[in-house]
Amino acid sequence: MSEQDRLDEEDAYDYQDHAHRERDRPDGPGDRRRRPTSAQELLSGTARSVFRLNGQFLAVSEELARPSGLAADWWQVLGAVLHEPLPVAGIARSTGLIPRDVRRIAELLVEKSLAAYEPDPAHSRAELLRPTGEGLTAIRRTGPGHAELAARLTAELGEEGLAETVRLLERLSTALDAIGPRP
């Protein structure tokens, strides 16, 4: 084995060990891990946690959506229009998806008769997406799994803990909207 191969292998082990420590580290009062000391470290830690949380939500969403015949991203787009029809741009803003992906998913939902377009009275060239009866039925089929996960999460965090988590995530999202994407 060459010296470079050996170093690459050591780096891979170091990375895996670091990832393992990050994943399994405790967060309790006896936690002795080094605390972030700068705003940049705090931002990085927040981003890692949110990226991991996003992956966890995508995985659980796929499982919850499966009985309804939906994919997680279909469920996400349909969920955005449950209370009122929205244009693609509005769905993108409310879900964090990019408009091109929303358009692709919306077209699939329309093709599968889970959603339909209707004219947007505010904009003559825009259309609003709304769920069809079949789409609403599919969403309702996610209900039992969704309720069971909500109950388990509430048991783990407590009702106030879960509510506080929602408030903090919304606060973070609002702050990011306020400061914009400038580097």
Image (cartoon, helix red, strand yellow):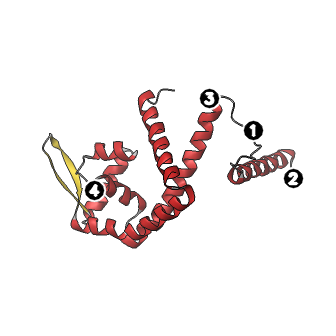
Q: Nearer the viewer, mark 4 or mark 2?
A: 4
Q: Residue at x 45, y 27 (%)?
A: 179
Residue 110: x and y, percent? 25, 61
Q: Quadrant of residue 90?
A: top left
Q: Residue at x 49, y 46 (%)?
A: 164
- Residue hosting label 4: 82
Secondary structure beneath label 4: loop
Measure how far apart labels 4 and 2 are at the Cα level: 59 Å
Q: Nearer the viewer, mark 3 or mark 2?
A: 3
Q: Is residue 98 left or right of residue 122?
A: right
Secondary structure beneath label 1: loop
The number of discs equals 4
Q: Nearer the viewer, mark 2 or mark 1?
A: 1
Q: Residues within 10 Å of mark 3 (few under 14, many from 20)?
A: few
Which of the two labelled residues, at mark 2 and mark 1, occupies the earlier sequence position?
2
Question: In the rendered structure, which amino acid carries the disc numbered 4?
Answer: Leu
Q: Is residue 112 visible?
A: no
Question: In the rendered structure, which amino acid carries the disc numbered 3?
Answer: Ala
Residue 182: x and y, percent? 47, 26
Measure how far apart labels 2 and 1 are at the Cα level: 35 Å
Q: Is residue 72 left or right of residue 52?
A: left
Which of the two labelled residues, at mark 4 and mark 3, occupies the earlier sequence position?
3
Secondary structure beneath label 2: loop
- Residue hosting label 1: 34
Which of the two labelled residues, at mark 4 and mark 2, occupies the earlier sequence position?
2
- Residue hosting label 2: 1
Mark drawn on residue 39: 3
> Is 134 located above or below residue 3 in the figure?
below
Q: Residue at x 59, y 46 (%)?
A: 49
Which of the two labelled residues, at mark 3 and mark 1, occupies the earlier sequence position?
1
